[in-house]
Amino acid sequence: MIKLSESEIQKKLKEVDGWEYNENALHTTFEFNDFKDAFSVMTRIAFEAELQQHHPDWSNVYNKLQISLSTHDAGGITENDFVLAKTIDKIIEGDS
């Protein structure tokens, strides 16, 4: 997978609402009603990430889920990161 340029990343960011680019990764935070809801979403994301063979860096504290995406092998952001970000957004939208 080829690392995207800064201009390509900025253009693609318009396709994913709520995601930011800094420190060579895409970042977002979601807040849920409680820990159970946050963990449930994490489980669904984990199955999709495994299917895509692209895994997030994330942390969960009670009802907050922080996610960072980058392609370590490429040394930055690739198309894989945006595909997974869109997948995560669809999972979150399904919970709304």
Image (cartoon, grey):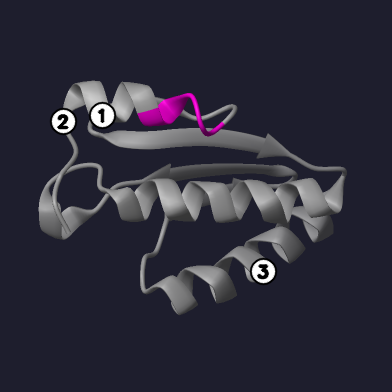
Residue labelled with disc 3: 44
| Sequence-earlier tag: 2 or 3 | 2
Estimate how packed mark 3 is, as few (under 14), some (14 to 19) or many (20 or more) residues with alpha carbons within 10 Å. few
Q: Residues within 10 Å of mark 2 (few under 14, many from 20)?
A: few
Residue at numbered disc 2: 5
Residue type for callout 3: Arg
Q: Is residue 95 magenta?
A: no
Residue at (17%, 59%) from the top-left corner? 1
Mark 1 or mark 3: name the one nearer the start of the chain.
Answer: 1
Mark 1–mark 3 Cα distance, whole angstroms, equals: 28 Å
Image location (x, y in percent) of residue 14 = 48, 24
In the image, residue 75 above or below residue 17? below
Instruction: Give the image location of residue 38, x and y in percent.
Output: 74, 53
15 lies left or right of 34 = left
Query: Cβ–Cβ below 8 Å for labels 1 and 2?
Result: yes
Can residue 11 be seen?
yes
Disc 1 to disc 3: CB gap under 8 Å: no
When the figure is inspected, residue 16 is found, relative to residue 79, above or below; the finding is above
Q: Label for residue 62?
A: none
- Magenta-drawn segment: 12-16
Q: Is residue 58 visible?
A: no
